[in-house]
Image (cartoon, helix red, strand yellow):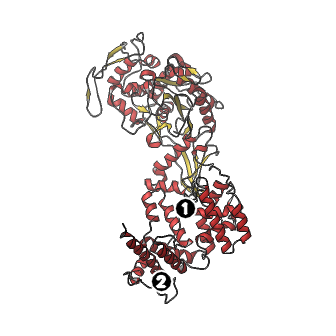
Amino acid sequence: MAAARPRSRFHRLGLTLRLLILAVAAGSLVAGLALPGVAALGLGARQVAVDFGSVPSDFTAPPLSHGSQIYDADGGLIATVFDRNRTVVPQSRMAPLVRQAVVDIEDYRFYQHGAVDPKGVLRALAKNTSSGSISQGASTLTQQYVKNVMVEEAGDNLSAVLQAQQQTLARKVQDIRYAITLEHTLTKDQILTDYLNIVYFGEQAYGVESASERYFSVHAADLTLPQAALLAGLVQSPSGYDPILHPVEARQRRDTVLAKMAEYGTVTEAQSVQATASPLGLKPSTPHEGCITAREGEGFFCDYVHQVILSDPAFGRSVADRQKLWLRGGLQIHTTLDPTAQRALQQSVTGHVYSSDQAATAMTLVQPGTGRILAMGQSRLYGTRPDETEINLSVGVRMGGGLGFPTGSTFKPIVAAAALENGILPTQQYPAPYSMPWPAMVDCNGNYFGQGLGGNVHNDSHSLVGPFAMPDAMALSVNTYFAQLEADAGLCNAATMAARLGVTTQAGGEPISVVPSMTLGTNDLTPLQMANVYATFAAHGSYCLPLAVTSVTDLAGTPLAEPKPQCNRVMSTTTADEITTMLKGVVEDGTGRPAGLTDRASAGKTGTTDGSKQVWFVGYTPQLSGATVVSDTRTPQDLDGQSIGGTVVGLAFGGTLAGPIWRDAIEGALANTPPTAFTGP
């Protein structure tokens, strides 16, 4: 170990001398400057000059990342979101004290030297050689600005960030080359202003304005001397001198800055002493930005919009392009969210299921014929505190959500639509006993499921026996009827119909499981998927992709994208209207009666999974489609016997537990909308 130290010191000396040679190559040192020891170290100035000349001289600083605003359909602000908490301000909105404090502590000869400070290099060489370590750097503020630009461009790419920060000769060559370009294109004041807007001050605060608000709850223009000195001291080590986490170290660093300001004549000795005697005077404020600040439960929709920007090719050809767009920020994002519908949904889900309950409910509302998502929310609020969550239960994993839920009998209308499209009439009757073996079926890949291979299928009640035709079987949710209907319609045809309706994958990302029990809702889907399926029935067979964003403009107001509804016919009008007629029967005379609306026509279907672990109600009016699920998301346990919304549930069913949540949300959302009637088949 003892033998390694001289080599380490020799290496550091060599690196510092190389920087001197760079300065010579850049024309920054006076002619004839002697560099003793360079030849002995084997460092060729000619080679360094060649390396320097190979670096492109053009340097353009990218636009700094800003916050983006997300608006609802009425133009109301949902939230300001950012990847980096930054507010860019001009020189006129920066206190002169903070500008000079940064210069005094980081590069006190900033206004006297060029891109490279020869005296600073020599000073660093002497100090580093005597100490045996790199205890003092030689980078000018312009070089530091260049490095910060490289880090900014790297974004969340860790390897690119590390590369921008690495202490190598190649990086120094690049920094100096770019710094020289900047010194020829910008004034010193402009460089300092840009530096103070880009540099990181810790606690997620980028730029002096955000740092002033984060630590002192004031604007950068209003900083006092002690405050300005503290912020200037953070630049060297934002985490090490964090005044919230390390107040002692932060105060020591602040006092060092104050001493330097007095030494260089920025302030008097008396002013420095007085400021040194003052406490830190912190008044921290949490950034009022991000989806967590959204009201009326809009945080989940806000997060969904973020995922849409990152995943939709309308906002960039590649994932990298879309990520760069989001990181740069400054976007004005207008969405489909209807504030009236959102308020009604949130009041319903939180009124029927408490955030502290073991169970949770999630709901999404979609406009038939356009796919516009009008509302999205759940009983647990968006956040990280107890009884909160950042997992959006209305969507799948790919869009920032969860693993979904088995849909139970709400899947049966999809099988019914496949049957009608393949020539089976609503009058088709089956014996529908209480229990029977699963019929034989074949999937789309030719896999054969023999009769009884999956055991027996049975109804919810021994008294529920046929024969039934399709409307009554739908109203009473007769499992054995739909097992036979699926077999006659064709398992592959049922899966094809599901795909036409946007159901190709489960919430976790895996393909849907095409097996006989599919008709009973064994696949894990989401409220958004199911609301969109039923919106297709309401739109007379026209399926629309979910639409959340209507326009995006950049910081200059230039339109970047204006997504439009994307709809296509996936079944005949007759088939869709036949399904609507049958689903009207569910809420009028069947299992969905508790969800029925009193002031307008409605249609829907209940769903209850094995053990009552999940209950659903999915329904629609001519103007609005919605899907509601209630599930124990933590264990999960049976809902039977749980306290939900202040009431102990005896037996949990889709109609009695999820149905009223759907009903209250729909009634509130459409309170000011005149009712319209369904069109008969």
Residue at 43 percent of width and 79 percent of height: 53
Between discs 1 and 2, the one toward the N terminus: 2
Q: Depth check: 190 or 262 in front?
A: 262
The answer to whether residue 89 is seen in the rendering is no
SS for tag 1? loop
Q: Quadrant of residue 373?
A: top right
Q: Quadrant of the N terminus?
A: bottom left
Q: Residue furthest bottom?
A: 32
Residue at 61 percent of width and 53 percent of height: 244
Q: Position of residue 368 (x, y in %)?
A: 53, 35
How many residues crowd around disc 1 within 10 Å: few (fewer than 14), some, or many (20 or more)?
some
Q: Position of residue 110 (x, y in %)?
A: 60, 75
Q: Amino acid at mark 2?
A: Val
User: Is 548 above or below relative to 2?
Assistant: above
Q: Is residue 110 left or right of residue 633?
A: right
Q: Quadrant of residue 234?
A: bottom right
Q: Position of residue 396 (x, y in %)?
A: 45, 38
How many residues crowd around disc 2 within 10 Å: few (fewer than 14), some, or many (20 or more)?
many
SS for tag 2? helix
Q: Residue furthest top?
A: 463
Point out which mark residue 391 bears.
none
Distance (Cα) linking label 1 and label 2: 30 Å
| Residue corresponding to mark 2 | 24
| Residue corresponding to mark 1 | 237
Q: Confirm or deny contact between disc 1 and disc 2 (CB under 8 A).
A: no
